[in-house]
Amino acid sequence: MSRPLLISDCDEVLLHMVGHFADWLREDHGLTFCLDTPGFVEAVTDTNGRPVPAETVWPLLDGFFDAQMHRQNVVPGAAEALQAIGAVADIVILTNIGDQYHANRVEQLDRFGIRHRVLCNRGGKGRPVAELIADMAPGPVVFVDDLPVHHESVAKHAPEVWRLHMIAEPRIATHVPPAPHAHARIDSWEEALPWILMRLERLPM
């Protein structure tokens, strides 16, 4: 019988990123990233409090992944949870970064004992999730991500998937409502692990 499948995002699910990005913007570029401002681009302002144009923000994000991934640290409980899940299910990490960062992401996760298949993606995650299901023909599938837009995409293209909204950065989580297309919102791996295992193992709920 096919094994169940966990498809997990990386940044702000397995590894902390946004706080380190904010520190780097302040230290190296004199910019502010306001963690309680909705929207990634909208959160970046200059020394006068003026919004930084999107065409400037996105290259800065690439600059972070080019040279600053060493700053990132593992989310508490993430590695241990994946170890427990890996005993009963396959795991794929679907991360929204360019293919040029694939090797660095694999190495980065390996430093924290997280050694699973890594796929890079740009844009909505619904289609790649559907493609994974078609390719792997798994049992039950759980998808974990911090961005509501990806839960909406997965709900559209792979509606049979269980969808868990998780934001591991508390300074962001308190200002973001639960994703309407997710089945649940849980922001810690300690609480998320039993929720995930119940669905992967088809246990009574």
Image (cartoon, helix red, strand yellow):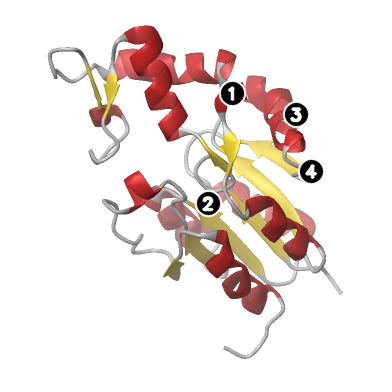
Left or right of 177: which side holds 149? right
Contact, CB < 8 Å: mark 4 with mark 1?
A: no
Name the residue: 74% across, 44% down. Answer: 114
- The residue furthest bottom is 204
Tag 3 or tag 4, which sits nearer the N-term? Answer: 3
Give residue 36's position: percent from left, percent from top: 25, 41
Tag 1 or tag 4, which sits nearer the N-term? Answer: 1
Q: Quadrant of the C terminus?
A: bottom right
Give residue 133's position: percent from left, percent from top: 69, 58
Q: Closer to the camera, 89 or 130?
A: 89
Query: Of circles 2 and 4, which is in front?
Result: 4
Q: Which of the numbered marks, if any, corresponds to residue 69? A: 1
Q: CA distance from mark 3 to mark 2?
A: 26 Å
Q: CA distance from mark 3 to mark 1?
A: 10 Å
Q: Is residue 95 above or below residue 181?
A: above
Secondary structure beneath label 1: helix
Circle 2 is placed at which residue position? 126
Q: Amino acid at mark 3?
A: Glu
Q: Amino acid at mark 4?
A: Arg
Circle 4 is placed at which residue position? 115
Tag 2 or tag 1, which sits nearer the N-term? Answer: 1
Q: Amino acid at mark 1?
A: Met
Q: CA distance from mark 4 to mark 1?
A: 17 Å
Q: CA distance from mark 4 to mark 3?
A: 9 Å
Q: Is residue 97 above or below residue 185?
A: above
Tag 1 or tag 3, which sits nearer the N-term? Answer: 1
Secondary structure beneath label 2: helix
Tag 4 or tag 2, which sits nearer the N-term? Answer: 4
Circle 3 is placed at which residue position? 107
